[in-house]
Amino acid sequence: MKNVDDLIASAAELADRGLSKGEIADELNVSRETASWLVERSGAAAKPEPDTKPEGPDDIHVDWNAIGSGGKRLTYIGRALADLLMETGETADVTIGIEKAGVPLATAVSRELETTLGAYAPAKHQWDEGDIEDLGGGFSRNFAPVEDRDCFIVDDTVTSGTTLRETIESIRSEGGEPLACVVIVDKQGVEEIDGVPVYSLINVVRVGEQ
């Protein structure tokens, strides 16, 4: 995807397929606010003039399809993420992948670190309209439990930190201990969330007028 029009078209396609706005946000690696704007924009009757830039949320789209579409490349990125975690000196029992994109990454990390594998579905996947705070996420019973276990958390991007915070809280509520989070791209420059350090391969820094 090269521009905003491509994102709008993709959001429209995903909405037509029945995905919630939360799932669209996850698929496009954008914030909830940006996902809402894209979906609303795709249904707008009036189109902006060709020489005008549509106003929208302040966000950055991350397209890592070149990694996700290649098993070997994904494995290499997983090894790099695992290397970041090894440098912490911590040893986990479970590597938790945040669905959807975080799970294949966590699989590669788990294999590299020789941990069991867990999966967490965040509340945003259910979110479409209304207050997301009324929704809840959950751990998949098809993967390893987190109770009484030390955990690493793996996701693809940090947009606002909300999903990582939710996952950390859920691990603790299940009786587990989150040790560290690791992502490919951090849009916010987050160093820690609720006392848990966050590591990233790439940090995005905005440079411009203040």
Image: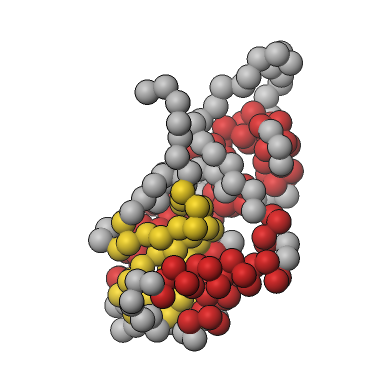
Report the colour scheme.
secondary structure
Residue 197 higher or lower than 110, as above or below? above
* Residue 33 picture location, percent across and down: 50, 37
Rendered residue at 57%/52% (across/down): 26
Can the viewer see residue 5 in this picture?
yes
Callout count: 0
Residue at 40% x, 84% y: name it: 93
Q: Provide residue 191's location: percent of width, then percent of height.
A: 33, 54
Which residue is at 27% across, 58% downward?
194
Residue 17 left/right relative to 130: right
Residue 200 picture location, percent across and down:
45, 58
Quarter of the image for the N terminus: give it: top right
Mark yes or no: residue 130 visible: no
From the viewer's perspective, tell me whether residue 169 is left or right of residue 10. Answer: left
At x 43%, y 55%, the residue is 163
* In the depicted structure, whether residue 177 falls above or below residue 116: above
Q: Is residue 30 left or right of residue 93?
A: right
Q: Quadrant of the C terminus?
A: top left
Query: In the rendered image of this protein, does residue 208 appear above or below residue 155?
Result: above
Q: What percent of the width, then of the height, locates residue 175?
A: 29, 77
Q: Is residue 182 above or below residue 202?
A: below
The front one of 166 and 52 is: 52
> Residue furthest toward the left?
195
